[in-house]
Structures are given as structure tokens and as C-alpha cells.
Amino acid sequence: AKLQRATSSPPSGGAAASSSSAPALPHAGGGSGVGAALASIGTSRADEIRASRALDALLEAYRRLSRPEKASRHWGSDRWAIYAQVLGRLRSLACISQWPVPKPVQHLSSDPRALDATGLDDPALAASTVDLAEGAIEARLLRIAVRLSCGQHKSEKAKEVAQRLPPEVFNLARIALSNVRTICVALERVMDESESRQVVKGVLMDAYAAHAAGLLSFRKHLGKEVQSMLETTQDPLWSAASAACSLGLRGVDAQSPSSLVPVLNELAPPPSEDPFQALHQSTLLMCISSLAELGRTQPTSDDEMPERVRLLLRQVLKGGEDPEVVQSEGSQTQESATAWPLEFTLTQLRKMRQAVRDEHPNVVGALALVQDALTTYALLSKALGLAYGDEKALRANPAQVEQHQAMMKLVRNLRSVWGDAGAVLVPSRQADLLALERVRLRHERLVQRAF
């Protein structure tokens, strides 16, 4: 009770004496401010140590690049690998030192998403991995810039691609190489140690900002032009795949990978209320026609030559002067080509489906040939829709359509069987087939009666 009274109502004199005699304690906020200041000093000191180590690593990599054991005019793959390390170390130094860079350039090794993508637990090791990977990309871009600026192309294809690029890409390539020269001069000044390192680091910082901005602009412009060329080259595949997907064929569902939508029916189009179904069908056939023209091969032997060409050569070798014999022999082929030209049209597709549905001509071999053409067409539609329905998957494939060997094989098979199936639908051919079928049936009855 005495203690409670003393604490609740202290005497005024004692309170004044205690307040005057007791030393003033520092405020809690002041204590935290001193701690924060000490922590910031420690952090800045650690950053300076990391920056110094990054600079030493950069100078060591540049020393191996600029003073090789065997100097040569042309760089090999090992020399470009060392240069990629130099660019990676330079990116690490810029990120650790927090050098200002113009937008949209950013320090990628300080991005948490990029660090998480490496799958490494150590942040320092993850940042170094990101910087080295970006350095390899920059070295590849500068290698392309050297070839564009000097006109060095390993193949005719590369030369043709370079001729399609606009002048802006060549100017950006020269600017990127000029910035690289400035960085090399700054690094030589740092290694010389005749000037203050802080002053030279400022020069290196400005050179890196110009280098990063110029190389990013060159990368974007070059990627945009290459992407445009790739889309132009792969346009028949993309249009055919889009048309096949519009007709009911889609790629694998992301939520259920095993579910695939059924594809085109070989005999009749799938029932649908889409008013643009005929348009999609025509687009698909038109793209297949373009692919068939790309997949045509020149005849390399006498067996692959057209029938009329062989007849003409035979007539010339015999020394005959009357071409009417050749014309009469090839009249049937000309009539078939006129009545059924090798064109992938919706009208021809409907005729083949109608022939199979009505069983006309009533010849087993002819109907089997038409059915084979429809089946090959359905298989090609499946391949186009499933393989190239996703645009990202298509862009990852080779740019040249001729390099898609499996798909081009299907196109060539369809081209061959499409022409053969159309030939049996010509009226004159149908009459001949029906006559031959009657003879075959009569002979078959005779054989069966004999045995």
C-alpha cells in the first residue's frame, strides 16, 4: 500500500529533484537512427567491395580477350566466348554499382522474376548466371552486327536475308560496334592506372549506357524484321492451320492434354452452323495448292516424265514428221487434263465426295482411288491443324517450308492421288471404266463357272 501511494502521488519536490538529477536518456528514435546509419555504412561498404570485385573480374576477362596467346585477324568461337564473358562481367558491374541506364534498358539481374527463373537458391549466383546469359546474347548480336557491317555472309541464303533488311538495321549495327570500341578504350584506361579510377569509371558508365541502349535498339529492329520475314515465309502453313482449326480441328487443350477435337470426315463435311465453313474449306484447299507447288520436284529420270513428253521424244528419235500420231496418242491425256485440271478447289472436293456417296462410277478400283484421295486430304488436314495450330510452335519450326519433310511428303502424296482420282471422274474415262468392268465381271463369271 505504501508503494502504491508513492507511485501514484509523488511529492513535487522529489519529482523535481529526480528530474533534475537524473541524466537525460536518448530518445528511442534517435537510437534507431544511429543504428540505421551504421547499417547503411556497412551496406555501402559491402557494395563497394562487391563492385571492386566485379571490376577486377571484368578487367581479368578483358585482359584474356585483348591479350590472347595467339593473335589472329578473325575471331573463332573460343574468342567470342571470352568476349561474351566480358559483356557479362560488365553487366554485373553495372547492376552492382547501380549505374543509370536509359529506358527501356534495365538491369535484368536485379529483377526477381529473372532470378527465380534460374532455379538457383543463391541470389548472387543467380544474378551472375543471368548476366552471363545476357552477355552471350549480346555477343551473338554483335557478331551479327560485324557480318552486316563488313558484308561477310557464309551462304547465299544469309546474303539474301541481309539484302532484305532496311538501312536502319545497318546503321544501328555500326552504332553498336562504335559503342563497343568506346567501352574497350575505357577499359584500357582503367588497366593503364595512369588516371583516377573513379574518373575512368564515370567514362565507362556513360559508355555502357550508350552501349546498352544502342544494342537494345538494334536487337528490337533486327528481331522485328526477321519476324516479318519468318511470317512471310511460313504464311501458307499458318493460313492452312488456321483454316483447319476453323473447320473443327484444334490443338491440344492446355487443361486436358489428352483431349483432341475430332477432325474432318473423309466423306462429308462435319455438320456445323458456321456460315463461313465453305470459306474455311476453300482457304485450306488454296493453301494446300500453294504447298503442293512448293513441293513439286523436277523429273530426274525417264520414268518420271509425263506421258506426252515421252511420246514426243520417241517420235523425234524415230525421225517421223507427222505429229498427228503423237497428238492422237496423247488426246486422252489432254482430255483428262482439260476436264480435271490439277487444282485443289472446293468444287473438285465436292465432286469426289459425291462420287463416293453415290458410288458412281460403280467400279471398285475407281471408288477406292477416290476414297484414298479423300483420306489423304483428311490426314493432311490433321497434320496441319495439330502441328501448326499454335503460332508459337509454328514460329519455332524451320523457316523454309521445304524443310518440313513429313508434311511435304503428305502434300506430294495428296497431289499425286488427287490427280489420279480426278481422272476417273471424267465422263469419257467413266464410260471406259464401266465397259472394262463389264468385261471383267463376264470373265470372272466364266472363271468361276469353270472352277
Image (cartoon, helix red, strand yellow):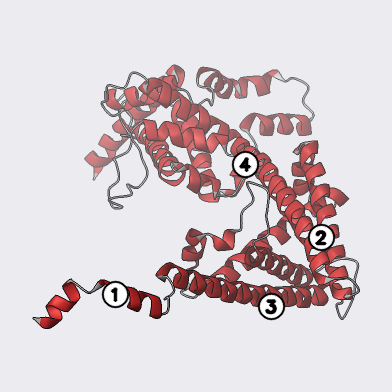
Residue 153 seen in the figure: no
Q: Which secondary structure, mark 4?
A: helix
Is 15 left, or right, of 390 in this rendering?
A: left
Distance (Cα) linking label 3 and label 4: 40 Å
**Residue 281 horizontal/vertical position (percent):** 41, 26
Q: Residue at x 29, y 37 (%)?
A: 444
Per the image, the residue denoted by label 3 is: 53
| Nearer to the camera, 318 or 287 | 287
Picture quarter with the N terminus? bottom left
Q: Earlier in the sequence, mark 4 or mark 2?
A: 2
Q: Do residues under tags 4 and 2 come within 8 Å of each other at their CB atoms?
A: no
Q: Earlier in the sequence, mark 3 or mark 4?
A: 3
Question: Considering only vertical position in the picture, is 20 above or below 397?
Answer: below
Residue pushed farthest front? 13
Which residue sits at x=87%, y=76%? 67
Q: Give coordinates of residue 183: x percent, y percent.
A: 81, 61
Q: Are circles 2 and 1 on residues that touch, CB within 8 Å?
A: no
Mark 1 lies on residue:
13
Residue beneath label 4, please? 227
Distance Cα–Cα, label 2 vs label 1: 69 Å
Depth check: give the residue in front, 168 or 268: 168
Q: Residues within 10 Å of mark 4 (few under 14, many from 20)?
A: few
- Contact between marks 2 and 3 (CB within 8 A): the answer is no
Residue at position x 87%, y 51% in the image:
150
